[in-house]
Image (cartoon, rainbow, N blue to C red):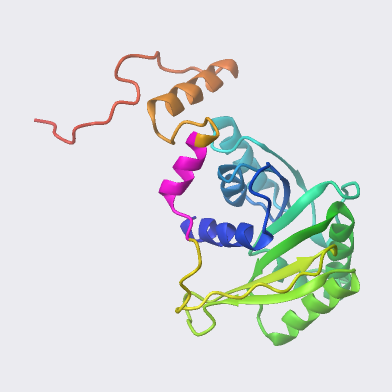
């Protein structure tokens, strides 16, 4: 969960979203909403697509619990294309999902066609000048070339950004795609010598929440809001007391 959160933070950084407004982001392969939670913590709303109904059930449970809020999601195979109207999204992120489209799991599936359907429909539903960032794990260089070719064929520009290329453990690959607009150069990948990279920390997230009027997670206010949400859903909740949200001292004797 922590690794996926860090990769999502890096993807958001590569999106270069404006700092002064909340954006609507498409999360492809959203799963249980881990990436979406990071998007919300950065002040954005999101719509997710995932092929697994079981994972989306988990996301729905997390939404009922209040862990994720500003979202909606749908079941869908990315290889069939996306059903959204033109220009509706300000950006797109995808964590550890794109490589699965390179597999032919069923008879008649052609990876090149499935990738092209995804990229062409994605290009249509993104606003001009926006970006899409895919973190992925390719099996070989041929898969990277196939993904890039189909993305360019659909109208995108851009390429692959590699963070920590000399590290076996920390190496991460991102396909960064541009929809046009002003001329944009491909971002530089991070390296062990990088000093200008701004790291997103848990403390920063909490500060961002406070700025936007959201109480820090696990605080008394956060717990009371969560209990109120459950009451509105008709669920049984323990009554509020002066001990609600109070930290334990750690001593039992």
- Is 216 on the left-hand or right-hand side of 26? left
Image quadrant containing the C terminus: top left
Residue sitting at 76 percent across and 47 percent down? 75
Residue 114's image quarter? bottom right
- Give how far across and how far down residue 54 sits, in percent: 65, 47
Q: Is residue 215 magenta?
A: no
Please report the residue visible at 85 percent of the width from the left and 62 percent of the height from the top: 181
Residue 47 at x, y percent in the picture: 73, 44
Q: Quick one: which residue is furthest to the left in this view? A: 253
Question: 157 left or right of 67?
Answer: right
In this picture, is 243 found above or below 66?
above
**What residue do we see at 45% from left, 21% from top?**
224
Count how many numbered circles sit on residues in the image. 0
Tell me which corner region of the image, top left, top right, bottom left or bottom right, holds residue 135. bottom right
Magenta residues, as a range? 199-210
Q: Magenta region's main secondary structure?
A: helix
């Amino acid at each position: 969960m922590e690794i996926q959160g860090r990769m999502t933070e890096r993807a958001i950084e590569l999106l270069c979203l404006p700092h002064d407004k909340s954006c609507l982001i498409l999360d492809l392969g959203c799963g249980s909403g881990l990436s979406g939670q990071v998007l919300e913590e950065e002040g954005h709303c999101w719509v997710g697509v995932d092929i697994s109904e079981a994972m989306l059930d988990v996301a729905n449970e997390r939404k009922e619990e209040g862990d994720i809020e500003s979202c909606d999601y749908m079941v869908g195979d990315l290889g069939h294309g996306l059903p959204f109207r033109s220009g509706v999204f300000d950006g797109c992120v995808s964590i550890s999902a794109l490589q699965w489209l390179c597999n032919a799991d069923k008879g008649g599936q052609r990876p090149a066609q499935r990738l092209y359907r995804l990229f062409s429909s994605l290009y249509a539903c993104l606003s001009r000048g926006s970006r899409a960032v895919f973190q992925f794990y390719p099996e070989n260089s041929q898969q990277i070339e196939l993904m890039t070719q189909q993305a360019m064929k659909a109208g995108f520009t851009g390429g692959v950004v590699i963070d920590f290329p000399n590290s076996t453990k920390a190496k991460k690959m991102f396909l960064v795609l541009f929809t046009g607009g002003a001329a944009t150069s491909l971002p530089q990948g991070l390296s062990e010598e990088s000093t200008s990279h701004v790291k997103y920390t848990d403390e920063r997230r909490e500060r961002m929440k406070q700025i936007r009027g959201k109480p820090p997670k696990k605080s008394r206010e956060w717990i009371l809001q969560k209990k109120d949400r459950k009451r509105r859903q008709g669920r049984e909740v323990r009554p509020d007391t002066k001990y609600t949200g109070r930290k334990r001292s750690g001593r039992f004797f």
